Amino acid sequence: MIGTNSNMQSIVEKSPIQKIEDDFLVIRGIQLYIKRDDLIHPEIQGNKWRKLKYNLQEAQEKQFKTLLTFGGAYSNHIYATAAAAEFFKFKSIGIIRGEESETLSSTLQFAISKGMELHYMNRETYRHKDEHATIKKLQEQFGEFYLVPEGGTNNLALKGVAEIIDEIDMDYDYICTACGTGGTLAGLVAGLSGNKKAIGFSSLKGEDMLTPAVNKLVHDFSGQTFTNFNINFNYHFGGYAKVKPELIDFIKEFKNEYGIQLEPVYTGKMFYGLFDLIKKDYFPTCAKIIAVHTGGLQGLKGFSNYFSESDLGESV
Ligand SMILES: *Cc1c(COP(=O)(O)O)cnc(C)c1O
């Protein structure tokens, strides 16, 4: 797509699928595979790349020079957008929630290193960032830009995520993903088009809002409503970016056992939940499960007190 940048590591077209071998799976006849979207690119990876892909293409086709997007100081989306903007030769502007702090997060330092121009927006205005008046003000301030929504979720994002389904050329019964806004789950549900079953593991509290949000996203994208998905809210570990010792231990064990790095905000919680459900015999015997590794490994740096240098070093 959209040209590549020869000076940089290229973006993997189709992420690999890796089988996980373990006794607790064998005794239940369960087959577990991981769709390794963390391997798409060291910086532009996971679901954030899937969501950006067609937005970048649209911005190129419409000849925008600048991308503008929103996020918090540790946002995987800000990180990926900054890297992708440099890669595809856009100027980029990041509108960061809250006040500028004295020490910049590693995420924001990285964004600046990729040429992203950062501006801070107070939390009150930020709540209204999607409103016409706010966007008009930003246009007056910065000129023309292609707007990528916070977290990257829109129709073009769903189109990109749905390609995960197209890439899987094996038989399976379930596909699992971590959930924040639900955009990624919505893309998978749209891609499945009523077949098989998708399970989302919520990284945050907020049970009543997420299922309708996914339904709306899927409907806006496809004009259809599907019921072959559910969202599990039992593994958020206290809420967004909250951790507990057993989650940190799980992430370390996972790396030791299978050689795959997870992080505590999204993928760690999903795999913790998925393993727990398998061990509680939630899935029928012989089920074939695919879990999407949605990337986000830069987020580990925000938890550097829990992890060793080697875990952090490999991720970025
Ligand atoms: C942003 C993110 C998610 C959540 O994606 P949504 O589409 O907002 O549900 C999941 N995993 C990782 C690694 C992420 O960075």
Image (cartoon, helix red, strand yellow):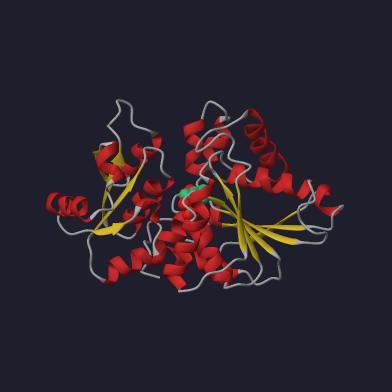
Q: Which one is in front, 178 or 102?
A: 178
Q: Which one is in front, 125 or 112?
A: 125
Kindly identify the residue that appears in the image at 68 percent across and 37 percent down. Answer: 250
Q: Quadrant of the N terminus?
A: bottom left
Total labels drawn: 0
Q: Is residue 152 visible?
A: yes
Question: Please, is residue 5 above or below residue 192 in the view?
Answer: above
User: Which x, y percent locates residue 256?
Assistant: 70, 39
Question: Please, is residue 226 above or below residue 125 in the view?
Answer: below
Residue 272: quadrant of the picture: top right
119 with respect to 228 (left or right)? left
Question: Please, is residue 179 above or below residue 167 in the view?
Answer: above
Q: Which one is in front, 223 or 42?
A: 223
User: Which x, y percent locates residue 136?
Assistant: 17, 55
Kindly identify the residue that appears in the image at 57 percent across and 28 percent down. Answer: 306
Kindly identify the residue that appears in the image at 13 percent across and 49 percent down. Answer: 141
272 with respect to 87 (left or right)? right
User: Which x, y percent locates residue 81?
Assistant: 36, 52
Residue 147: quadrant of the picture: bottom left
User: Which x, y percent locates residue 115?
Assistant: 27, 47
Q: Which one is in front, 280 or 38?
A: 280
The residue most toward the right is 27
Q: Is residue 45 visible?
A: no
Kindly identify the residue that appears in the image at 50 percent across and 47 percent down. Answer: 296
224 with respect to 100 (left or right)? right
The residue most toward the left is 140
